[in-house]
Amino acid sequence: MKLTVRADIDLDTTDATKAASAYVTWLDVDVADPVTNARGTARVAIVHVGEITDALGDVAPALQGTALEPIARAYFAEGWYRDEFSDGAGIDLIYVASVEMNDEALARNVDLAMIRRLCDTLGSGCQLAVMPYTSPLDAAHWGRLGFSLTTSGRANGLMHMKLGYRHARIVDSTGSGDYEVLPTVVLHERHTAN
């Protein structure tokens, strides 16, 4: 099973009023398997945080009035990531706006596999992966990947995953298109002293 990705990139970065469209790359991601009939889509944004701060000095004004405004309030302060989200893993932020799957794909965990793969590849230069959750059940489902609640104590809100840390792996161990979540096993400690 493969992902098909289409990007929407604005070429004009000179107009500050178009900052969000100039510094956010929107991706439409499709997955389909004709053998298992698993199908789904995702709408994902890569927020080019470094480019925004270089050009405008702050992320919040660039995202004001857009669908991404809530992430500016939740994850940024004084022009950069809040301390609790600033771990040096990357500069950008990958935002999963929506994931829609048919029942066959959901039964096979294709949604989890899709988002894990997007975080590992297109999100490799990102500090955080962020997505909305609509219910505690939804939050628990995505928590299997390593997402944590940003807006805890609420029935809906935002959740994040720090991409500099190791998280669960998603594998198709049988080759049948059924994905399972495996915890990451650290075989040895990282060398941290000279």
Image: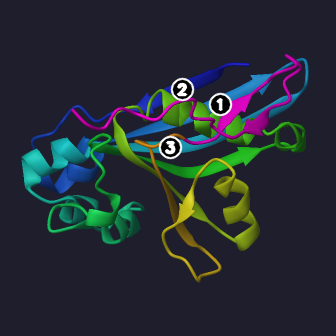
Q: Is residue 130 above or below residue 30?
A: below
Mark 1 or 3 closer to N-term? 1
The answer to if 179 sits in the magenta stretch is yes
Please provide percent x and percent y for residue 30: 65, 30
Dot 3 amino acid type: Val
Q: Which residue is mark 3?
A: 44
The boundaries of the magenta stretch are 167-194
Dot 2 amino acid type: Val
Q: Which residue is mark 1?
A: 30
Dot 1 amino acid type: Asp
Q: Counting other residues with Cα less than 10 Å from the Cα at mark 3, is it few (<14), some (14-19), or many (20 or more)?
A: many
Q: Which residue is mark 2?
A: 5
Left or right of 94 in this view: 97 = right
Asked if residue 86 can be seen in this view, the reply is yes
**Mark 3, secondary structure of its residue:** strand
Q: CA distance from mark 1 to mark 3?
A: 11 Å
Q: CA distance from mark 3 to mark 2?
A: 10 Å
Asked if residue 15 can be seen in this view, the reply is no
Left or right of 50 in this view: 47 = right
Q: Is residue 93 above or below residue 68?
A: above
Q: Are marks 2 and 1 in contact (CB under 8 Å)?
A: yes
The answer to if 23 sits in the magenta stretch is no
Please provide percent x and percent y for residue 63: 28, 60
Left or right of 31 in this view: 175 = right
Q: Is the stretch drawn in magenta largely helix, strand or loop?
A: loop
Q: Is residue 124 above or below residue 173?
A: below
> Residue 85 lies in what quarter of the image?
bottom left
Q: Is residue 155 above or below residue 183?
A: below
